[in-house]
Image: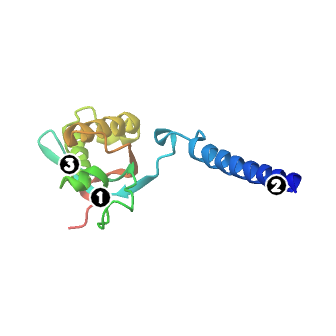
């Protein structure tokens, strides 16, 4: 009888210890740090822009460009809106900033040779565009700016 009682106590002790150990291990195991988790990125398109190219006091044509940009996808669990991260929460529209900066950079770029548009450094342009948009927003919202199209359309090719 004593042996049966000791076996019962031993079984309960082992069960309790293994349950406690498993719960402790599960709660304290090393998981990936929140910063180390992969960010979910989202690509947003902006409306196409047409920038007039004026040379020697005359309209020569238009640069037609279309951009998109990469941002961290908003988390669905934080409120009910369609979300846009910090910028839309602060009442800012990143699309407008991207379009405005792109227009300003193309219009004011004296190095842009519309006769040889293929020599235009799009890589440097998009990096500068991303930096300037983030500077104007006050935080790094835009991760990368992408070019969907970039072409010069001569004035004579535009139907009247």
Q: Is residue 63 left or right of residue 5?
A: left
Determine which quarter of the picture holds residue 28.
top right
Instruction: Work out whether 132 lies above or below 48.
Output: above
Q: Is residue 136 visible?
A: yes
In the rendered structure, which disc, 1 or 3, sits on the residue that comes first in sequence?
A: 1
Residue 14 in percent (x, y) is at 76, 48
* Furthest residue in direction left, as rendered: 57
Q: Residues within 10 Å of mark 3 (few under 14, many from 20)?
A: some
How far apart marks 1 and 3 lie (CA) works out to 11 Å
Quarter of the picture holding the C terminus: bottom left
Q: Residues within 10 Å of mark 2 (few under 14, many from 20)?
A: few
Nearer to the camera, 152 or 20: 20
Q: Measuring 73% from the left and 49% from the top, which residue is drawn there?
A: 13
Quarter of the picture holding the N terminus: bottom right
Question: Which disc, if any, is residue 5?
Answer: 2
Q: What secondary structure is marked by label 3?
A: helix
Q: Are marks 3 and 2 in contact (CB under 8 Å)?
A: no
Determine which quarter of the picture holds residue 144.
top left
Q: What secondary structure is marked by label 2?
A: helix
Residue 69 in percent (x, y) is at 36, 50
Which residue, given by chain and number where applicable, does mark 3 sit on? 100
Q: Nearer the viewer, mark 1 or mark 3?
A: 3
Q: Is residue 33 left or right of residue 69?
A: right
Q: Are marks 2 and 1 in contact (CB under 8 Å)?
A: no
In the rendered structure, which disc, 2 or 1, sits on the residue that comes first in sequence?
A: 2
Question: Which disc, if any, is residue 48?
Answer: 1
Q: Nearer the viewer, mark 3 or mark 2?
A: 2
Residue 27 in percent (x, y) is at 57, 46
Nearer to the camera, 85 or 118: 85
Residue 116 in percent (x, y) is at 36, 39
């Amino acid at each position: 009888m004593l042996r049966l009682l000791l076996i019962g106590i031993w079984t309960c002790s082992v069960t309790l210890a293994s349950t406690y150990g498993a719960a402790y291990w599960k709660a304290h195991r090393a998981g990936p740090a929140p910063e180390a988790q992969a960010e979910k990125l989202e690509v947003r398109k902006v409306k196409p822009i047409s920038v007039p190219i004026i040379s020697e006091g005359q309209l020569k044509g238009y640069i037609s460009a279309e951009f998109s940009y990469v941002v961290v996808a908003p988390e669905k669990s934080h409120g009910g809106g369609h979300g846009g991260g910090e910028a839309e929460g602060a009442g800012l529209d990143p699309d407008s900033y991207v379009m405005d900066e792109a227009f300003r950079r193309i219009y004011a770029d004296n190095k842009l040779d519309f006769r040889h548009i293929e020599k235009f450094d799009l890589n440097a342009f998009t990096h500068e565009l991303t930096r300037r948009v983030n500077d104007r927003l006050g935080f790094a919202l835009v991760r990368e700016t992408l070019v969907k199209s970039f072409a010069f359309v001569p004035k004579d090719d535009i139907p009247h």
